[in-house]
Image (cartoon, coloured by chain):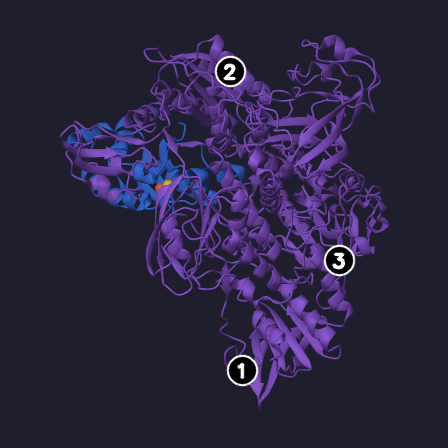
Amino acid sequence: MTQDSAAEPAGGMGQAPGNAAASPVPGGKVGAVVVVGGGVAGIQASLDIADSGFKVYMVEKTPSIGGVMAQLDKTFPTNDCAMCILAPKLVETGRHPDIEIIAGAEVEKVEGEAGNFRVTVRKRVASIDPRKCTACGRCSEVCPIETTSSFDEGLCERKAVYLPFPQAIPLSYTVDRKSCVGCGRCAAVCPANAVLFGPEETEVRTLEAGSIVLAPGFEKFDPTGLKEFGYGTYPNVITSIELERMLNASGPTKGHVLRPSDGRVPRKAAFIQCVGSRVGKQKERYCSAVCCMLSVKEALIAQEHTPGLRTTIFFMDLRAFGKDFDEYYKRAESEYGVRFVMWRPSHLSEDPATGNLRMVYETRDGKLAREDFDLVILAAGIRPPAEARRLAQVMGIELNSYGFCRTGLFGPTETTRKGVYVAGAFAVPQDVPDSVAQSSAAAAKATAGISESRGTLKVKLDRPAERDIGGEQPRIGVFVCRCGINIAGTVDVSAVVEAIRNEPDVAYAEENVYTCAQDSLRKIQDKIKEHRLNRVIVASCTPRTHAPLFQKTIQGAGLNAYLFDMANLREQCSWVHMREKDAATEKAKVLVRMAVAKARLLEPLHRQRIGINRSALVIGGGISGMTAALEMAAQGFPVTLVERETRLGGLGNRIHHTLEGEDLQGHLKNLEERLLADKRITVLTGAEIRSIDGFVGNFKTVVEIRGAGCRVPGAGTEGPGTPHPAPGTLTIEHGVIIVATGGREYVPDGYLYGKDPRVMTQLQFEEQYAAGTLPPYKTVVMVQCVGSRSPQRTYCSRVCCTETVKNALLVKTEHPDAQVFILYRDMRTYGFREERFREARDLGVNFIRYEDDEPPVLDEKGGKLVLTVRDPVLDRKVRIHPDLVTLAVATLPAAGTPELAQLLKVPLNRNGFFLEAHSKLRPLDFSTEGIFFCGLAHSPKFLEECIYQAQGAVARACTLLAQEALETEAAVSVVDEARCRACGRCEEGCDFKAPLVKVWEDGRLHARINPALCKGCGKCANRCCSGAITVKHFTGRQIEKMVEAALSDFCAGPANGGVRQDGG
Amino acid sequence: MTEFQPKILAYCCNWCAYAGADLAGTSRIQYPPNVRIVKVMCSGRVDPAVVMAAFRRGMDGVLVAGCHPGDCHYISGNEQAAVRMAFLRGFLDEVGIERERFRFEWIAGSEGGKFARVIQDMVDNVRRLGPFRPESLVAAGGGAR
Ligand code: FES
């Protein structure tokens, strides 16, 4: 939630600085941050920074923000449409009063130090002034020059004057200087006089900032140089991002997969994994981490789009290590029939007559197979950004040996220069949710150092006064979105607009190409004023993603946010009735009429402002929890940390070595010392949460202290609640909650575990190794995926492959002669961890792959361990006599997670981990406001990932704590107190304790609902025995009117669509 | 003669069932256009009166869909719905509304396929039954309002 919901769209963008309210205190730290890069990472960092009270300068080198995510069609593992979830963020960034986007610009120089940087930026003066451009497109129509579109990966042409993409921010045409011939036609036709013609000019600006966040993204690997696959020579060899554009409904082939050579629909497509990753030169041997899932997704979507298409993925290890990824991969295989072949083809040859590609590969039984495909997709990896070197020089930071930004294990967002932080793929190749979490973390770090300057540069915006519509006849404005071709390709949008225009009370109706685009939003505001509209309907996509955007828009024009409704013409009409265009059009009319029917009865609703307790509760005292508490204190907010055990440290206490060789135990100790020394932090160990009441901004938590272990440093000095070191219960009041409950090891029930001391988990191995208590050994077998990726626990535990490699390396360095066997299913040493996997192979560790239906078997015969496994290379069972067997067991959510989930009233996923609000863009938020989570409570992950998630959760929480007051839900239930018979059923049934039946100040006994607690679900209205409860915004009358309108195409009358009479 | 096109009304909760319907869309799962969705925040809000309102106005079938047990965004709204809908079912029997015309389902946000299947099913079943005549209700009293 941004604080200024009434911001003008398009306002606050591209204008000169100086709109900031106050200038920084001389000598103090500057309350502003420069964010370099406008992809999803830069966007997330900017929003979090700006929402917690700082000014952001976003420096993006291209003409629009959005980055690579804007090019994607769908996102794994939910198949959400990438643009649909990104677009609201783009718009929010574009209109945020505290974010200034400086597009077409690069940083040239950085002077000063943390807290007080002077950042010199050179910006190309846009040939088309974004402040004037209305994106009408006339310039592009008349431009005579055609060139290839880089947004569409060169798959189609565009003009030299072009719009980067339909949802671009800033929404402005731009001139491709390289192709422009300077004919001047665009300038001649521009109705807004926005084209500034002349030689390219640049301007220099100097920005004052306290911190810098680097999020320049990555470069897509260009496979042109790889002769073996013929990319660039064979037309039917394409890259995954090219396929992504094809799959996109607004892409060059309108969502159809077509062979570039002849435009035919392919029947058989192959994906080749690890192109430009894991193999090749030393500095290119990392794993790009995202390509496996990208290919699985593309295979699945391509098959969905193309009837008859069969896809095969050729892979080395299928690295589906993220939350819900393995399940997605399994589904692609079993439900969609995507074929997976474990082999990396060495080269392709083309049949010039057909354009087909021949691949030779080895089958599982060792025979050479030859197979023809009519389309081949190269899963091209992630490279450091092209400007990495220059950027490193300008910033004065170091790069790692792969050319990415150098960071440390314990400071995953910290560069080598103080005050400069990194987020997204420039830190390490990673997917969207990891980038987003890390970007929030960078936001936390960038603002912690300048927290005393919070709010000093914040723009004070006056929300336009709300127009009183009392007594006005409904005047409804309807905006019907074509959504490119997403809606218009199936529904006759103009016909819908025509039909609606004639409905009673509809004062205005029009269609838009994209109603969510910035110019359309501006238009909605203009039309509200011009036609004195007092209700607005947008008929476009799902309100679940887009309603807030439109609500803010009408607020900007003085209308109450609840005088708005949507008709879902895309998800619930055009996309599901693609083969019945007429029926879809008729249905669309009905859906809009239903919205109109409801709109007539809409009334303005108001939120209440409630005070916020500006302190935090952190649940869990492992690395994630301790990190979160410290970061929260660094932001200047008091925090209480509650740990169930008597000792802090959690699972981390059992980890003695890290892959990177850093001293974790030392780090833990340091965290603990800082924690106990900080007066803003209250630490309660040996303490258990008993109840959590209240709501965002005002939680009340009862903690039971069991006596032993409780420590409250600086007792009574600062911090929320009254410290109470003695056993008993303690009530803490706080505004936000960060859940960091961690995880635990799965206890295996096979492999003689618990029966034979020579069999142990990886963590036990580590502990015994560190303590020197391991039995003597010559042969070690390490079994992977014990308890993970199984029917009971469908997920991959993500860290175990690397843990195992780490321990195998320990063994090999200590005892070079020891034999080590790793029995695995896929080695998922993603990112830079790949190097250590390679090292293990070089040191002679034996890797044997087993299939999930044929796991290794461990027996004991005459005191000896006997392990049998099928070796797929030899294609026979091999027997090993290990002296030591380690099991890479699954990571489980912490004990007590379900109980805590109930206290918090938040959901768990099917594997028992906490479920986030959105897997891609809100990985650290619960859908319940005010509660955040991080670390293993989210899903299995590495130490550095836990750390950045903890920091990220703090940044998310600070967007609330930075506010003076919060606003409540406005669409709540209300009791007609005269009608209430005080039966008490509402009170009994409410899960949020909102209704209360008592004798009120009017002297009567009846129910009343506390709007601060009510969530507006309406359950109480259902239970009410006297019909005295109204559910605001979903009233019985509104619903009845919608039902009547829903029948409008079936009955005769002016609204009769007429195609489907049932004759009854 | 054109085929009878049943009119189906679906009350979907915002958090799961409506999201499931959205997912059917993003996954491009095709189903008959006979359904109109009315969004409510929670299935627990759907009382017998709004279901009857739909029948009385001439809907041929009504679906109420909420989150799976345990998944309700408001904790137990869907259980409340289950209780009320069980009650309603008895009432429908009494007033002579065929069982297939009314359905109560758990549909998760991840179950786009299920949403489409349920709709297809209902359309098929209700088509077999033929149009619903609200007039027939009046005789039986039509109780809930
Ligand atoms: S929110 Fe879905 S049933 Fe309650």
Give the secondary structure at mark 1: loop
Asked if the residue at label 3 sits under 8 Å from ligand 1, the reply is no
Disc 2: which residue: A525
**Res A34 seen here:** yes
Residue A856, horizontal then vertical, whole percent:
60, 74
Vertical side of A993 occupied by A516: above or below: above
**Res A496 seen here:** no
What is the C-alpha distance between the residues marked 2 and 3? 56 Å
Disc 3: which residue: A344
- Direction from residue A742 to residue A772 in the image, left or right: right
Residue A389, horizontal then vertical, whole percent:
80, 42
Residue A807, horizontal then vertical, whole percent:
66, 70
Task: Tell me which chain the residue with mark 2 is part of.
Answer: A
Give the secondary structure at mark 2: helix
* Eye-nearest disc, 2 or 3: 2
Q: Picture quarter containing residue A520?
A: top right
Q: Are marks 3 and 1 on the same chain?
A: yes
| Residue A756 badge | 1
Q: Which chain is blue?
A: B
